[in-house]
Image (spheres, grey):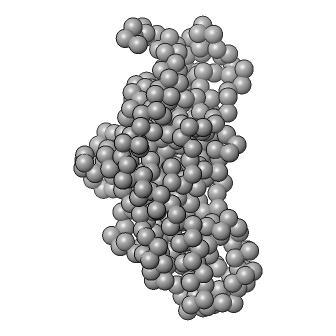
Amino acid sequence: MAFKPLVFSGVQPTGNLHLGNYLGAIKRFVEMQAHHDCIYCVVDQHAITVWQNPADLKKQIREVTAAFLAAGIDPKAHVVFNQSQVPEHAELAWVFNCVARMGWLNRMTQFKEKAGKDRENASVGLFAYPTLMAADILVYRATMVPVGEDQKQHLELARDIAQKFNNDFRDSVAAAGFDPDEGFFPLPEPLTQGPAPRVMSLRDGTKKMSKSDPSDYSRINLTDDQDTIAQKVRKARTDSEPLPSEVAGLSGRADADNLVTIYAALAGTTREAVLAEFGGAQFSAFKPALADLAVAVLAPINRHMRELMDDPAHIDAVLADGSERAGAIAAKVMDDVKDIVGFLRSRRR
């Protein structure tokens, strides 16, 4: 029996959701729900791999949820919840810690980047982040995961963990009533297609747009009002040359390429189409058009987010409902995992 198609993805609640988060993740989440069953998670347990102010973290969990809803994710048709309310994520992560190999985790480039030179002071959670990510996906036996380039290596690890679990417990998988050739866990596929997989800084087109950049003018935050959005676009760094008429002309022009890419993603079109319209124009003409487009797309999301954030009880109710529905799926999968691994099931449920 083939695995049921299911999309899983999540966003960390670490503050300052920005245009890159919207175009690279949330906008795609909204589009996928028309064609797939989807589970979308606020991954708050991942957030604490580096220290978070507890009061800020609570606010940021609600802010990510508000962004999901304001952008158009339907929490009734799909599942929206926060990770820490479903304990099976952490429970399965421990099993996967015992399946994954140290050598696999040592090869994860994102840990090396985030830990920097002071690896000895990095948290164990930051090191083991990929096994929790694997558990996030596989506790629902999800088959598809929309990921950015920076998470593809982690998804490959999730596939390796699933494959090793299936191989290590092949006889137990069969004894539990599952096809041992198919395995208990699917090998989730990455969904990397998107109009703007890497949105770059407005101050430096060679660097990814980031919430940690000290300059607020490097990014457009989803909480920015329309005047701030327009001002940031006007101040975005460019060069003195007019826009080319073909994409090849953007080579070596990172700032220009970034603004064209953002326009195309917001408009739902291609860079070729943007340059067909604006090729030969100066940035003094292009930036106002981009500002108008950004305001038209983002300002309604901003307004709706503010309304939702003014009603935290509603957000909490959405998360509670989603957590109950997610937990029902995860508990069944975890019971099967316990049988397969050789644990005794809890009688507490």
| Residue 46 shows in the view | no
Dividing the picture into quadrants, the one containing residue 8 is top right
- Residue lying at 65% horizontally and 47% vertically, measured from the top left: 32
Instruction: State which quarter of the image contains the C terminus.
Output: top left
Between residue 123 and residue 136, name the one nearer to us: 136
Please give left or right for residue 274 compared with residue 58 in the image: right
Point out residue 131 in the picture as x, y percentages from the top left corner.
Answer: 45, 35
Please give left or right for residue 280 compared with residue 198 in the image: right
Point out residue 314 in the picture as x, y percentages from the top left corner.
Answer: 41, 43
Q: Compared to 18, does 91 lie above or below?
A: above
Q: Compared to 308, does 274 lie above or below?
A: below
Q: Compared to 152, does 239 lie above or below?
A: below
Between residue 57 and residue 97, name the one nearer to us: 57
| Residue 197 shows in the view | yes
Looking at the image, how many numbered discs can be counted on the residues? 0
Point out residue 110 in the picture as x, y percentages from the top left corner.
Answer: 43, 51
Point out residue 251 in the picture as x, y percentages from the top left corner.
Answer: 64, 78
Between residue 198 and residue 27, name the one nearer to us: 27
- Residue lying at 37% horizontally and 71% vertically, measured from the top left: 216
Instruction: State which quarter of the image contains the N terminus.
Output: top right
- Residue lying at 48% horizontally and 20% vertically, measured from the top left: 331
